Image (spheres, coloured by chain):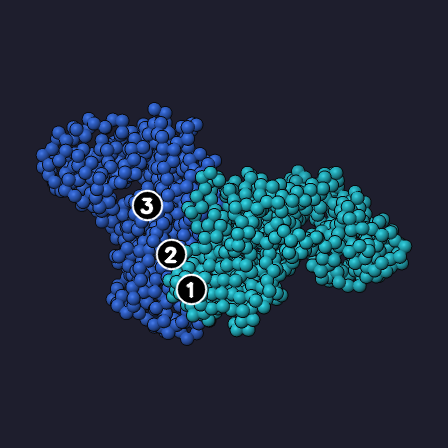
Chain colours: A cyan, B blue
């Protein structure tokens, strides 16, 4: 099959007209920008990652394993670097590759389908491949035993520059992400770009028995680390709107401590009440067999999502999240209410004021992560709180709380306790650090010298937010592009659905209404997110650059605040200002 | 009793230390400003009122009696004028009166207590008194048959310039507002300022049988009209924070149609279900005797509260509300749920999607005002919705829905149907104009040419808001004042309590935390408002003027948007940006 035909075939299968239009006007046709800047940024990115790792592994502090050190503020550039990889490389390639290179590739070949060893081609190491991530050094990927130079193919890729996620490494995790690639003709097409073999197997990292993080699970290579120990990371924003249900291995990871390795056979979930003491224990098997299984799509969002926008105003303490510390998954398991009833507890009648959730992740002193919610909130969400053992129909991955976590729809991620092992009704809220002295919102004149964490309640429901996922910051549109398709997510806490997303391409002077794709959930229990899309005409008077803005209104017509300055806070939480992305439109 | 001693006695009874401090630093000690400006503004105010009345009375439109005409936009200056009456007059007086005038008054007199006719003094008409509203023309008030010149007393008034509310008219309605005045020594003190008698009785307005508004009730003179037919009005903001429960006659009035005059004996409340038809009727007596009476303090707020701030950006259609189209009252009556149960309806089981509430106020075509809420919301608020027959422990005034209105806590005023006569479960929401084509929120590029009212849901829960009630716009502090005490309200829809009010006296560069007085309500069912107060030091580098700002965060950490521009909409609803007040600090 001729390569261009196979691209076309793949296109019709996976990409709708809008996606193709977007590709044409936006992703595949980016203009040339200084490539030395790009390389520099990429190298700095790797340096930061390494220094980050060593910094994190050598330090613990009195708050247990809380590794949100000042070093992490360096990560301010991290998302920008990814933007560079996505955008700039593609733009450089566009002008050189269009026909010649691909035709040359077609002419090569006697094909060895399926990534097997191809005799007569050079053998490379994984380290060799890793050096080839940019157009200047050529962009290489691996597939099984094959090494491929995709440099000249990038701009023809129907999925746009997302192919660059694999630059310098294996393409397989991304093909797993996008099922359309699992076809013979795609492999065949890839083989046309074959330049060598790889025989080496990826090295297992040496197990350091003194490192409490040594037994942490592997993460998908697309996850952008925000810290390594504990591991925290988010997917690139450009892939977030590909799936209404965020795939498990692309769901942002927020760990406060090392990831427990739980033995299912000995797993117990204890239910107790302050005063009477322990009531009941449930085994994993009990949870699966004794109760009705409820499934609901629920967004989890870190309180610090979009913190990187606050960091630009003034440093804050916290992981430098981009816009993707948020994900939407279908969670399944018994209703908390059913478990409590089984344990003889009627949530409407108890006198205790809080429900505490204890995890199995522990700090060096042996204290577990714990969070609580007010009993009032538990009553409002009575049939909505799930003791989940499945995430998107699969067992919950270790990073997300295997085997069981609590899912409390509409509230902040920090209370969605993973590796759940105890549920306790108590007169006092959890005394855990993250409940008492973190995840609270202050005004911008509160600093670490005058903060009084007791003055405001722990964050529960989150405010309305939205973000632009595509195009990403720094994108260069096609020269003299007429329009640009903008995509993103919107969500609000408390089950409040999204009623409107407004988008602007002139920095907020005029606004358009985005088309919403609301989830099929009741309007007052909209716990999943709402994707939105708008195709905006490029203003005639643009001077080569435009600012795209989005802002959402929820069911109670709460809106996002205009500026980050107005909501800046020392901990960098609740960062829900209008989201702004700057893109360029070069003259042809 | 010497007059100054009686003032001191009154002070200790009614005013706490903070109030006195505020008086000293802010209200009683304002510097002299051009008095001709003041007179001009006052006269313009009266002119506007009169033109407003004639404009309103001569027009009806196709949407029934909706009298929110363009003429009303003139009212933008209305609140400012009130500010002038409050602030400027007091300031002028301060410098002249301090000792001399009051001592002179003490020297007069053989007193006739209680406002009886005082032989030997001149007789004035009500029209004469009405001309005396400013320092230049002297400030007169009446009490029963007495006429008093209070000009030289104003700055000594322990309640500050609020006494000027009565300028040119009777002081009795305000003494009823502030109970402390109902004492012999206060009357005695007033008599020292006696200048004349009044024998005339206030004229009853001629009844015009062709005017559907002719039978509207009388309103408290402190209510600032926003339109006369239908009557809409709000209290001055400076008196709003005097009472946690807004007195009935000072509660903002929002009428869409003429006020019904209901005969209690024939009053019926019909409950019906689409399909099966009429279920049950309740008499007023049934409501009072057959059901448990529930009482809750609930804020009602017009969707257009603070619309005047939007008008400054660009004209909008709607009444030009200041910050006081909001009030908090204790409403009493049966739970809606109990009534429905009695009618055989289980709100959790019905298949109908909406509950419609019908009023007795009708447009010229005979169509009544009607509103509906989604059944989902009715379920969330199951035990909170009250079929109210009492407002602050009294029968509901005619303007507020006598004898019965629905109270749905946490949502917009427009659904709190007054003169309630029918409750209907239906598959469709109300088709009433105000449900379908009004009270919805759009972005600022939607105009009357491109608006699609079907594109967004009817406003139910309202977003978080707060406003500064004192000092009012244009206040002049005492020369070289060190600080200023700022007071206001904060509230959010959906029962979300207020967790923080931030105040700034440097235009938003730095912030202070206000002290909150939250109501004693559950945190997720905080339906009443939260008063707040802060004493802010005047910045050293002020140049004679400072901008005070307040902004609140609610329990879900939703915040007010920074700018009015960002939320401007063609209907001027949902105006909840940071509230800003500009005041002056003259040099001594």
Do badges 2 and 3 share one subunit?
yes
Residue at the spot of label 2? B522
Percent coordinates x, y for residue B387 in the rendering: 33, 63
Name the foreground residue: B461 vs B117.
B461
Q: In the image, is residue A556 above or below residue B5? A: below
Could you tell me which chain the residue with mark 2 belongs to?
Answer: B
Which residue is under mark 1? A277
Q: SS of the residue at dot 3?
A: helix
- Lateral position of residue B205 relative to residue A348, left or right: left
Q: Closer to us: mark 2 or mark 3?
A: 2
Does dot 1 land on a helix, a strand or a loop?
strand
User: In this rendering, do the residues under marks 2 and 1 share a single chain?
Assistant: no
Q: CA distance from mark 2 to mark 1?
A: 27 Å
Distance between mark 2 and mark 3 Cα atoms? 23 Å
**Front-lying residue, B547 or A346:** A346
Q: In this view of the protein, which residue sits in the foreground, A545 or B371?
A: A545
Query: Which residue is identified by label 3?
Result: B240
Residue furthest out toward the front: A209
**Residue A80: horizontal and vertical position, in percent?**
65, 43
Q: Which mark is residue B96?
A: none
């Amino acid at each position: 099959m001729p390569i261009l035909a196979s691209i076309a075939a793949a296109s019709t299968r996976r990409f709708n007209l809008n996606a193709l239009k977007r590709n044409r006007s936006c992703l595949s046709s980016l203009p040339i920008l200084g490539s030395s800047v790009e390389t520099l940024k990429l190298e700095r990115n790797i340096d930061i990652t390494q220094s980050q790792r060593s910094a994190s592994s050598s330090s613990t502090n009195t708050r247990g394993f809380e590794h949100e050190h000042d070093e992490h503020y360096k990560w301010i550039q991290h998302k920008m670097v990814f933007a560079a990889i996505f955008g700039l490389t593609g733009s450089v390639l566009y002008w050189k590759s269009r026909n010649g290179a691909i035709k040359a590739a077609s002419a090569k070949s006697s094909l060895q389908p399926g990534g097997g060893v191809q005799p007569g081609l050079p053998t490379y190491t994984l380290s060799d491949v890793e050096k080839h991530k940019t157009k200047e050094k050529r962009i290489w990927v691996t597939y099984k035993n094959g090494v491929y130079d995709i440099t000249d193919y990038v701009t023809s890729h129907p999925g746009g520059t997302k192919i660059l996620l694999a630059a310098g490494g294996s393409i397989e995790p991304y093909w797993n992400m996008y099922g359309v690639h699992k076809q013979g003709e795609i492999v065949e097409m890839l083989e046309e770009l074959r330049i060598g073999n790889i025989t080496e197997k990826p090295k297992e990292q040496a197990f350091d028995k003194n490192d409490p993080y040594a037994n942490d699970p592997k993460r998908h290579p697309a996850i952008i680390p925000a810290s390594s120990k504990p591991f925290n990371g988010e997917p690139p924003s450009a892939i977030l709107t590909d799936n209404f249900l965020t795939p498990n291995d692309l769901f942002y990871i927020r760990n406060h401590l090392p990831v427990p390795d739980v033995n299912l056979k000995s797993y117990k979930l204890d239910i107790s009440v302050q005063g009477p003491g322990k009531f009941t224990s449930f085994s994993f098997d009990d949870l699966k067999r004794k109760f009705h299984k409820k499934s609901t799509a629920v967004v989890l969002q870190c309180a610090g999502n979009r913190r990187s926008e606050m960091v630009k105003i003034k440093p804050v303490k916290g992981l430098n999240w981009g816009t993707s510390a948020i994900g939407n998954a279908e969670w399944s398991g018994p209703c908390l209410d059913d478990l409590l009833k089984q344990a003889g507890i009627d949530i409407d009648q108890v006198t205790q004021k809080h429900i505490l959730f204890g995890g199995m992740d522990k700090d060096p002193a042996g204290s577990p992560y714990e969070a609580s919610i007010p009993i009032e909130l538990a009553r409002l969400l009575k049939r909505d709180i799930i003791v989940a053992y499945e995430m998107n129909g699969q067992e919950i991955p270790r990073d997300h709380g295997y085997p069981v976590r609590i899912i409390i729809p509409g509230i902040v991620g920090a209370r969605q306790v993973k590796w759940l092992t105890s549920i306790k009704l108590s007169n006092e809220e959890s005394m855990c650090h993250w409940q008492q002295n973190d995840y609270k919102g202050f005004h911008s004149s509160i600093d670490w010298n005058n903060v009084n964490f007791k003055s405001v309640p722990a964050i529960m429901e989150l405010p309305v937010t939205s973000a632009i996922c595509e195009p990403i910051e720094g994108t260069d549109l096609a020269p003299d592009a007429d329009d640009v398709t903008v995509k993103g997510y919107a969500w609000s806490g408390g089950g409040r659905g999204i009623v409107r997303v407004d988008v602007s391409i002139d920095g907020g002077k005029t606004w358009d209404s985005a088309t919403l794709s609301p989830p099929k959930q009741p309007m007052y229990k909209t716990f999943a997110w709402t994707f939105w899309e708008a195709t905006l005409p490029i203003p005639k008077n643009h001077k080569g650059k435009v600012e795209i803005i989005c802002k959402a209104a929820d069911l109670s017509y709460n809106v996002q605040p205009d500026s980050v300055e107005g909501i800046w806070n020392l901990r960098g939480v609740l960062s829900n200002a209008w989201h702004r992305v700057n893109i360029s439109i070069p003259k042809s």
